[in-house]
């Protein structure tokens, strides 16, 4: 009867049963679970597993970048990803806000306001160190054993590592292994790439001003880095191999690129780098080729930042010893995150074909631990994951792009509601509203179930997060338009969407309050 209970209480009962079983039997393995990788996915999984009564050991080790950058416990997000990126984004937005403040009547005397790059880097790094420390304390409090070493398979149940003290190699055995080793930035195979270029692993602790920067790559990382550098007063150029933000809604991606151009960010379209050399004055000469015109060119930069995607860190795992299947440099798993070896699992960025996002990694890790040690059957739902590109006008979306909706449902079965809008706070400083735009992609029939929401404007992530929950709950256009907005906000624009693309009507608003 007890086992028929559902929800958290059922999970708790399983957890208690599991703890009793663990206490009463002599363990065959040193640990119930070894986690390889102490980033978002690995830590979430390890902590949840301990909460469910498992004996857990977590390995985490960071190899320095080619220019020697290293960091502490917590993985990409905390050290060289979301967190320092958001802080630099905020720093760049504040630069803009200072100028807006003048229009609002603030007396800002120094007309030549410049950020202090080294001070900013110091502040960002101090914050990261405090998070590293809290993360370590949290593991200790939760009784997750932590080893700051690289782990590798000897066989399916045995992990070998070199203790930090430089002693001989040690081994531990585990009933289950979770691989959560994440990824690292790629470097192009061209002369000078690793000698003279840096990546997102280096920029947040870069000890000198980046100056004129070539950002190679037009995905999330490239665009976000170019934007915060521009906002901080540097001069970035983005080199685009094919299109910006591949995989995102095309109209929104092109709008975003146009917004960046309006702010003075240069783009080298359909261009790939050929080489990087250091000149006698210390600056970097980059040669490149335009693949449309088939012409070669070159330019000189102070910094070259590779943002050409990330590779999974499988090379040091000795996965062959465990017989784990891989594809490209990622691990192949099924819906329960199990690899082809049933007691070996993978979560987070290392998994083939999954979104590389922190909340995805965390929830997948947590749910896996509950399934392993608390009798849960809940699988991770990878559908309709909301995301944001942190550019000065941010772009956030959830659900399908217009192209995907048309491909899946047919153009005749889709209605797209859209509109430009004018944020009230933009009027006094006379900020450009050209790119404040949003759209809802919906089914045309019935109550018009919403398939995708797209928003470009201030604090897009904050705006879309709540709508993401609504979309997962089956939001329709009818419900959206029956929702009373909060005035004056930009999020309320979703409740005022009345113009369809099909109608051909002008989506530009006449005033803020009509
Ligand atoms: P990681 O966080 O990379 O952790 C893996 C850990 O395992 C690392 O510490 C690694 O060194 C260690 N390791 C590797 N091999 C071994 C081994 N053999 N033994 C022991 N340890 C090992 N996501 C968002 O949701 N929002 C954002 O705004 C965002 N911004 C980003 C900005 C940048 C610049 C980047 C690069 C990424 C950003 N991401 C963002 C993505 C996010 O950081 C990742 O999706 C997330 O960190 C993945 O977590 P993970 O646990 O899978 O891997
Ligand atoms: P992406 O794969 O998103 O983008 C890589 C970019 O580099 C593409 O524009 C690609 O062009 C280009 N490229 C690839 N190879 C080359 C090459 N050899 N020469 C020139 N250009 C090349 O990777 P990112 O590193 O930007 O981001 C990785 C992941 O990290 C993202 O998918 C995202 O999940 C996560 N992330 C999330 C963020 C957020 O949530 N805000 C922020 C940053 C990262 P092409 O289109 O032609 O292949």
Image: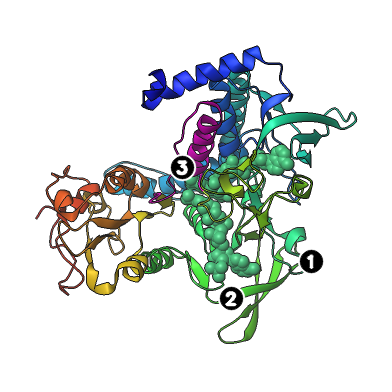
Q: Which residue is mark 3?
A: 380
- Magenta-span inclusion, residue 300: no
Which badge, 1 or 2, is on the more N-terminal residue?
A: 2
Task: Work out whether residue 163 can be spotted.
Answer: no
Residue 186 horizontal side relative to residue 104, left or right = right
Which badge, 3 or 1, is on the more N-terminal residue?
A: 1
Q: Nearer the viewer, mark 3 or mark 2?
A: 3
Which badge, 3 or 2, is on the more N-terminal residue?
A: 2
Q: Which residue is mark 2?
A: 271
Which residue range is magenta in the image? Answer: 357-386
Residue 228 horizontal side relative to residue 468, left or right = right
Q: Dot 3, crowdedness within 10 Å: few (<14), some or many (≥20)? A: some
**Looking at the image, in which quadrant does ligand 1 appear?**
top right
Q: Based on the displayed image, in which of its 4 quarters is residue 268 positioned?
A: bottom right
Task: Tell me where residue 82 appears, x and y as whole percent.
Answer: 52, 44
Q: Nearer the viewer, mark 1 or mark 2?
A: 2
């Amino acid at each position: 009867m007890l086992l028929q209970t559902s929800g958290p209480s059922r999970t708790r009962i399983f957890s208690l049963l599991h703890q009793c079983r663990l206490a009463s039997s002599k363990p065959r393995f040193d640990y119930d679970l070894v986690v390889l990788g102490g980033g978002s996915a690995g830590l979430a999984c390890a902590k949840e597993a301990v909460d469910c009564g498992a004996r857990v050991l977590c390995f985490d080790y960071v190899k320095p970048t080619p220019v020697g950058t290293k960091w502490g416990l917590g993985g990409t997000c905390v050290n060289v990803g979301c967190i320092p990126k958001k802080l630099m984004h905020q720093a760049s937005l504040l630069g803009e806000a200072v100028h807006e403040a003048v229009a609002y009547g603030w007396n800002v005397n120094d007309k030549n306001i410049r950020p202090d790059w080294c001070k900013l880097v110091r502040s960002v790094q101090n914050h990261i160190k405090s998070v590293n420390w809290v993360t370590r304390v949290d593991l200790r409090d939760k009784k997750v054993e932590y080893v700051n070493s690289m782990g590798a398979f000897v066989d399916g149940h045995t992990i070998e590592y070199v203790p930090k003290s430089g002693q001989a190699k040690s081994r531990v055995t585990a009933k289950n292994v979770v691989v959560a080793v994440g990824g690292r930035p790629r470097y192009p195979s061209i002369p000078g790439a690793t000698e003279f270029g840096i990546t997102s692993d280096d920029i947040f602790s870069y000890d000198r001003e980046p100056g004129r920067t070539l950002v190679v790559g037009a995905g999330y990382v490239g665009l976000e880095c170019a934007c915060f550098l521009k906002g901080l007063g540097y001069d970035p150029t983005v080199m685009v191999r094919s299109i910006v933000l591949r995989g995102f809604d095309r109209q929104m991606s092109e709008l975003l690129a146009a917004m960046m151009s309006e702010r003075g960010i240069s783009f080298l379209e359909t261009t790939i780098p050929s080489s990087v050399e250091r000149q006698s004055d210390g600056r970097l000469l980059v040669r490149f080729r335009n693949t449309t015109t088939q012409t070669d060119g070159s330019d000189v930069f102070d910094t070259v930042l590779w943002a050409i995607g990330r590779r999974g860190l499988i090379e040091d795992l000795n996965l062959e010893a465990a017989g784990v299947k891989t594809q490209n440099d990622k691990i192949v798993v099924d819906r329960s995150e199990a690899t082809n070896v049933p007691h070996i699992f993978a979560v987070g960025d290392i998994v083939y074909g999954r979104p590389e996002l922190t909340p995805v990694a965390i929830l997948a890790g947590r749910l896996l631990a509950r399934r392993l040690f608390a009798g849960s059957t809940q699988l991770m739902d990878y559908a309709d994951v909301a995301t944001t590109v942190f550019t000065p006008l941010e772009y956030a979306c959830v659900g399908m792009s217009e192209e995907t909706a048309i491909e899946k449902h047919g153009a005749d079965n889709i209605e797209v509601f859209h509109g430009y809008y004018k944020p009230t706070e933009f009027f006094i400083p006379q900020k450009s509203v050209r790119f404040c735009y949003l759209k809802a992609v919906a089914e045309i029939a019935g109550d018009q179930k919403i398939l995708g929401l797209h928003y470009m404007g201030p604090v897009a992530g904050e705006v879309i997060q709540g709508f993401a929950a609504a979309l997962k709950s089956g939001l329709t256009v009818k419900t959206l338009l029956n929702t009373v907005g909060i005035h004056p906000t930009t999020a309320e624009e979703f409740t005022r969407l009345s113009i369809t693309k099909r109608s051909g009507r002008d989506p530009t608003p006449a005033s803020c309050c009509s």
